[in-house]
Amino acid sequence: MFYTIDILGTIAFAISGVLVAIDKKMDLFGILIIAFVTAVGGGTLRDILIGETPVSWMKDITFTYVIIASTVLAILLRSKINYLRTSLFLFDTIGIGLYTLIGIEKGLNAGLHPIICIALGTITASFGGVIRDILCNEIPVVFRKEIYATACILGGVTYFLLIKLPIKSNLVFIIAGIVVIVTRLLAVKFKIALPTIYSHNKN
């Protein structure tokens, strides 16, 4: 199940990267690069932080194939995808839900404290999008008012609360992932956001 989640997260983030790159009118190479960094950026940083090198996508060529296939599919079906105004948001949200769990699992396997595991889950989920947005000349979503990293943290906390209960691990993964996705969906729907700090200096 862990491997399946990783593949699904890769597909979701790759497609979200493709949609942003198309919106920025990039060429085919640009679209592929944005798809790639969106899909593996967070995981690459996570693996480097825990000293797991070569990083996961370099050890398994399947991830490269999945990203290329997702990119081609998203380009071919872009007209259908574009009919869904919320498609980028949905793919991005599904991606962060899946990748949060992957980061947590990696942290647990490395024997790290639950708080650090949640931080790794948030990094895994967020930093591919951060790199994508920076390359596309946008302020990263995670640094804006939207509930993004906070959703990952809530999902992580849910995971560690649930594993103390007599619940099957697969079900714990599903529930924690749903918490991330639903938190972000509700936050956007009802315009719930963290407070923004403004400077009092008007000069």
Image (tube, rainbow, N blue to C red):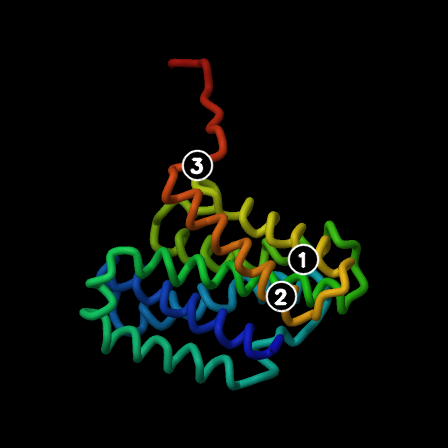
Q: What's the amino acid at mark 3?
A: Ile
Contact? badges 3 and 2 (CB < 8 Å):
no
Q: Is residue 163 visible?
A: yes
Left or right of 136? Residue 179 is right
Q: Quadrant of residue 26?
A: bottom left
* In the image, residue 148 above or below residue 75: above
**Element assignment for label 1:** helix
User: Any mark on residue 192, and which?
Assistant: 3
Tell me residue 161's x, y (percent).
72, 53
- In this rendering, the count of numbered labels is 3
As measured in the structure, the alpha-carbon distance from the residue carrying label 3 to the one carrying label 1 is 23 Å
Contact? badges 2 and 1 (CB < 8 Å):
yes
Which residue position holds label 1? 159
As measured in the structure, the alpha-carbon distance from the residue carrying label 2 to the one carrying label 1 is 7 Å
Left or right of 124? Residue 165 is right
Which residue position holds label 2? 173
> Of callouts 2 and 1, which one flags the residue occurring earlier in the amino acid sequence?
1
